[in-house]
Image (cartoon, helix red, strand yellow):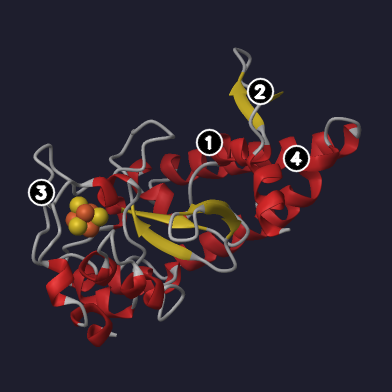
């Protein structure tokens, strides 16, 4: 894989260091990045998991696609706005805070010649459990991941989402999943099983934030319940268009 990165040294030299690529989202991690985790350059709080079925914008393809498998990426700064994808290691001066130890995708990417990055796509990706092992985090984190994935799968949400406007049962089932996700996160923090800033790695992003992909805005009511509001933008429809 290193050959892919080193294949375009002349092109990397032309990088203007504008930081645009780093603002479009942190890199996904691959096996060669394992040492960055085991050596403590990347910690759980620096990472974010994208779960199978989650709709994401693929900038190399220029469209929204459902993820076929799990990806672990470098996260945006903790507490960033939902539409801010900037890599947490990008400094105000467009420098990389971990320069010299960047993941392999960063070293491969050059915006005017994305071939090297495309060649990495889907190859030797590190999933959550592999990353958990490299972090030296407790093995029972794997059980938390499995329990959460079983109850909060994107496949199930995707099946329910188109029906919730007319089908009260589908709406109730959809809301139950979103509420379970929220309660599961609260419980993990309450039991001190993980830190709040580690949850985006451990469980992926909260459903309260990601259901926007179905054209739904999930809002917490004053009584603590969750309301679903239809938004004008339906990312799911955009994805369907793209897949035709
Ligand atoms: S790790 Fe560094 S080079 Fe890679 S996206 Fe983040 S700021 Fe940019």
- Give the spatial CA distance, label 1 vs label 3: 29 Å
Quadrant holding the C terminus: bottom right
Q: Mark 4, residues whose alpha carbon is within 10 Å: few (<14), some, or many (≥20)?
A: many
Secondary structure at numbered mark 4: helix
Mark 3 residue crowding within 10 angstroms, few (<14) / some (14–19) / many (20+) = some
**Badge nearest the viewer, 1 or 4:** 1
Residue 152 lies, in percent from the top left, at 65, 51
> Circle 1 sits on which residue?
209
Residue tagged by mark 3? 95
Q: Check the image and report above or below for 109 versus 62.
A: below
Q: Local crowd at mark 1 within 10 Å, few (<14), some, or many (≥20)?
A: some
Ligand 1, by image quadrant, is bottom left
Q: Mark 4 or mark 2: which is in front?
A: 4
Q: Is residue 77 left or right of residue 94?
A: right
Residue 107 seen from this side:
yes
- Which residue, given by chain and number where applicable, does mark 2 sit on? 225
Task: Quote the CA–CA distance across marks 1 and 4.
Answer: 14 Å
Q: CA distance from mark 4 to mark 2?
A: 13 Å
Q: Earlier in the sequence, mark 4 or mark 2?
A: 4
Query: Which image quarter is the N terminus in?
Result: bottom left
* Of 167 and 138, the residue lying toward us: 167
- Tell whether 213 sits left or right of 73: right
Disc 4 marks which residue? 174
Q: Earlier in the sequence, mark 1 or mark 2?
A: 1
Marked residue nearer the N-terminal end (1 or 4): 4
Pair 1/2: label in front: 1
Q: Can you give x and y, in whole percent of width and height, for residue 123 in the image?
A: 42, 80
* Secondary structure state at the residue bearing disc 1: helix
Task: Name the foreground residue: 139 vs 99.
Answer: 99
Answer above or below: position of 233 versus 210. Answer: above
């Amino acid at each position: 894989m290193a050959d892919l990165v080193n294949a375009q040294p002349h092109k990397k030299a032309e990088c203007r260091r504008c930081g645009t690529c780093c603002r479009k989202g942190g890199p996904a991690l691959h096996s060669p990045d394992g040492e960055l985790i085991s050596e403590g350059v990347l910690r759980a709080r620096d990472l974010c998991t994208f779960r199978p079925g989650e709709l994401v914008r693929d900038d190399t393809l220029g469209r929204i696609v459902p993820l076929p498998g799990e990806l672990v990426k470098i996260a945006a700064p903790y507490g960033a706005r939902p539409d801010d994808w900037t890599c947490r290691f990008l400094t105000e001066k467009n420098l990389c805070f971990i320069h010299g130890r960047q993941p392999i995708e960063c070293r491969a990417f050059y915006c005017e010649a994305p071939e090297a990055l495309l060649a990495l796509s889907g190859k030797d990706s590190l999933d959550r459990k592999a990353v958990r092992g490299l972090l030296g985090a407790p093995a029972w984190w794997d059980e938390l991941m499995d329990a959460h994935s079983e109850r909060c799968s994107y496949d199930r949400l995707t099946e329910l989402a188109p029906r919730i406007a007319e089908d009260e049962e589908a709406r109730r089932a959809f809301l139950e999943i979103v509420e379970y996700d929220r309660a599961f996160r609260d419980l993990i923090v309450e039991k001190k099983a993980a830190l709040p800033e580690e949850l985006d790695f451990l469980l992926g992003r909260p459903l309260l934030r990601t259901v926007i992909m179905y054209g739904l805005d999930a809002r917490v009511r004053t009584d603590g319940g969750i309301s679903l509001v239809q938004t004008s933008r339906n990312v799911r429809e955009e994805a369907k268009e793209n897949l035709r």
